[in-house]
Image (cartoon, grey):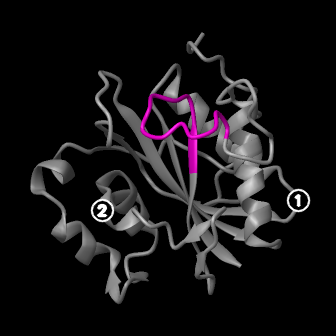
Amino acid sequence: MRGYVGLGSNLGDRLAHLQYAVDEMAGTAGLSVQRLSSVYECPPWGHVSHNLYLNAVAEVLWEGAPVELLRLVYRIEAADGRHKHGASPDGPPGGAMHYADRTLDLDILWLDGVASSDAQLVLPHPLAHCRAFVLLPWAELAPSLELDGHPLPWWIGRLPREEVLACRQLGRLLKAAGADGNQSPTTSRPSRNGS
């Protein structure tokens, strides 16, 4: 099934963390990274920090169940260092670590034909429509995709103008084998401090 995964990082070598996630997804059996949006640099949302985020969206094809994709993104986050004591590789890394600086944040935004209000996975993502850092890159890939009966650009038009203008498009900086004909270099896990 076709889906979209949001990627974000605001600690360490932010671009390397995003590329690591793309490479891990592309190297997973049953998951194919089809296309990648531009990378955007955006201020934090939901918390105060001096660290700007890099954000992007990946269009994927997934052959498994939605909850299996959720477990996969949790494992990728944990392998990249977003792990706190007591967190399970099958649960959210760091427990309830909402709205904080992080090396890597992956969110399943949408899966074709899946509407879920399960405690583990709510789809479409319940806050996607109110976040410029999600909507701007996502609309590059799927401008006609609708959330609650409206296409993604319509939602962008409802955001505060200053929030949209605060996100700066940096270009297509991520690569994935098979995505838009780009080949991804072998990427090792980036260090947390960017060295």
Residue 172 spot, x, y in % from top left: 46, 48
| Residue 82 image-quadrant placement | top right
Q: Which residue is mark 2?
A: 130
- Magenta region, main secondary structure: loop
Q: Residue furthest left?
A: 161
Q: Secondary structure at mark 2?
A: helix
| Quadrant containing the C terminus in the rendered view | top right
The kind of residue tagged 2 is Cys
Residue linked to disc 1: 29
Query: Which quadrant: the N terminus?
Result: bottom right
CB atoms of marks 1 and 2 within 8 Å: no
Q: Which callout, 1 or 2, points at the residue further toward the start of the chain? A: 1
Which of these two is toward me, 179 or 156?
Answer: 156
The region drawn magenta spans 93-106
Mark 1 → mark 2, Cα distance in angstroms: 32 Å
Q: Helix, strand or loop at disc 1?
A: loop
